[in-house]
Image: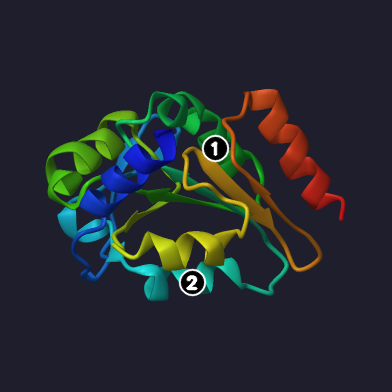
Amino acid sequence: MRNFLFFLCLILILSSCKNEHVEVKKTATTNQTFIEVTLEDIPTVNYEGLEPIFNKKDDKTYVINFWATWCLPCVKELPYFERINQEYKDVEVILVSLDFPKQKEKRLISFVNKKKIQSQVIHFDDFNEQVWIPKIDKNWSGAIPATIIYNKNKRKFYEQSFTEEELQKEVQSFLKS
């Protein structure tokens, strides 16, 4: 039943696809630069537009987190991802929002600005979850939060929320590989 409700919500979330050009505006904040986003700053992509971020072969470690503003465990762990993004030069954090398409402007954009999120945010909008969920990970039920950590030597999928210590430990294990 839980999976059915999730998939029903996901279908509603991913009911339309469009791509947007990204232009980043920066404003000064205390001790760091904050990216103040507008509707145009967070691209909306379908799976075809998202797929390339799962296959990079450079020297970075990638942390890709699937989340939504309405998911309390997701929101709770976002500061941990932000710290990872700030602390490690060779780690790139990408936050893939599964927020409803009609809530992008009112909910997602205001949330990112209010929380001063520095990591790259992508709004994912693809109604065909029966296709893209198993492509991301064959064992993923579709529940969020979910995270992929990978580099050119190692890849691991996590269908769970993290404590800050757990996330740090996992990222560090990739930096050693």
**Count of picture labels:** 2
Which element type, helix, strand or loop, lies under badge 2? helix
Foreground pick, 56 / 50: 50
Foreground pick, 173 / 98: 98
Kindly give the residue lying farthest to the right in the view shown: 176
Q: Which numbered circle lies on residue 119? A: none
The residue wearing badge 2 is 51
What is the spatial separation of the Cα atoms under label 2 and label 1, in whole angstroms?
A: 21 Å
Point 31% across, 67% down: residue = 45
Point 46% across, 25% down: residue = 73
Horizontal relation, residue 54 to residue 34: left or right: right
| Colouring chosen for the image of the structure | rainbow
Give the percent coordinates (x, y) of residue 27: 28, 44
Task: Name the amino acid, label 1.
Answer: Phe
- Does residue 45 appear anywhere in the picture? yes
Viewport quadrant of the C terminus? bottom right
Task: Name the amino acid, label 2.
Answer: Glu
Foreground pick, 55 / 143: 143
